[in-house]
Amino acid sequence: MAFAPYKQRWLLVVAVAAVSILLLLFNSTSRGWVLPENVPELKKETSPYTPTSSTSDIVAQTTSAKKSDSTWASLPQHFPVHSITTLPPGKPGKVFTIQHTFADGQTSKIKNLQQRRRDAVKEVFQHAWSGYKTYAWLKDEVAPISGGSRNSFGGLAATLVDALDSLWIMGLQEDFEEAVRAVAQIDFGRSEETVVNVFEYTIRYLGGLLGAFEISERKHPVLLDKAIEVGEMLYAAFDTPNRMPVTRWDWKSSVEGQAMQASDGQLVAELASLSLEFTTLSRLSKDDKYYDAIQRITDELQKAQNHTKLPGMWPVVVDARTPSFSGDNTFTLGAMSDSLYEYLPKVRVHSVIHSPQTNPITAAPTIKWCHLSIPRDVRRITWSHKNPPTISAYDQAK
């Protein structure tokens, strides 16, 4: 009898839990949150063209591609550039192979294992691509549970553009050609978003189109045409007094003729991770203005590199309006800075730029000392302290 109250409480808990689960299932079903196997069959959004395997048809679409309704190239600038830094002459440096080189004479067992692994990766990709085509064609991304779609990057088919090079690499030629036809009909001179993240648009759209153009052996000029369309739009974000870009950019205000200036507190990765795409765009389009735009940022990085609170590296938050790199004492190779340290070496190797300016190697001793030598807990305390490590302490550590 002593255990009766506990038994009654246990039964009450079970009953409440059961009712809660039933209510949750009822509400989620009514709102469309159903399990994947119960996703209703949705009508497929198809490309305006009939698929074809003819590469010549794709090449011919350069002249028939939809032109942007925006006229960014002819938009008057408040702070025009009077002297443009030209892209250095020469050919791009050799791109090093990062894939593993398998030894000759491998057994059939190993070869079969490698093939099965490749097939498994390709099968997963095809599954994802099929889902995107069926439920989110020409949208930014698919919502896998509801079977719907989302436009989280301006509604310019981000998944499609981002997947172009993968389609080519995996030998999915018909899917690649269908995607190129779709790209030809997208107006990349506008956005569904009021505020454009210039960094995201650069790496996803500009980088995706340029990468697909080059990896497909430049056989599809429409990809370069559309990359220029993206570049023309993003170039307008550099129309500031010191030509530093507005990285979170109200593009409609620019269309309306409003002057703007760069932020006095922005992430260094968003400011300094545009170099690879803009340099490549200048090289392929023969228009130096994109390289000039990015070189102005590179010059500021070079000036400040050895004068920050941790010489050799740049802080997470910078003042692009002044510009100044001395206000923040937070340094990292992680999020909000990582792409800066990733892109500079790539530009140095892949492009025709071999000048000592903004040499990523200069940061190596600092990175080695701060990120590889100091324990993580000490690092965290050091960087959050009001007095960051002094130059003398840095020199002694070297």
Image: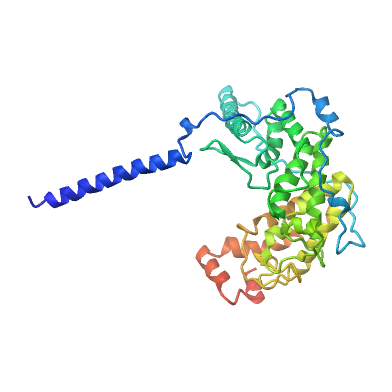
Q: Quadrant of the C terminus?
A: bottom right
Q: Nearer the viewer, residue 31 or 210?
A: 31
Q: Residue furthest left?
A: 1
Query: Can residue 245 be seen from the camera position used here?
Result: yes
Query: Can residue 348 be seen from the camera position used here?
Result: no
Residue at the location (79% across, 23% down)? 54
Query: Along the horizontal axis of the image, is 385 left or right of 274?
Result: left
Residue 90: % across, % down: 89, 48
Residue 120: % across, % down: 57, 29
Residue at the location (61% across, 74% down)? 389
Query: Along the horizontal axis of the image, is 322 left or right of 115?
Result: right
Picture mark count: 0
Q: Quadrant of residue 379?
A: bottom right
Q: Nearer the viewer, residue 393 or 252?
A: 252
Q: Nearer the viewer, residue 47 or 199?
A: 47
Residue 324: % across, % down: 73, 71
Query: Along the horizontal axis of the image, is 282 left or right of 183?
Result: right
Q: Image height check: is 246 above or below 135?
A: below
Residue at the location (66% across, 66% down)? 317
Q: Quadrant of residue 27?
A: top left
Q: Residue furthest right?
A: 82
Image colouring: rainbow
Q: Image height check: is 19 above or below 328?
A: above
Residue 8: % across, % down: 17, 48
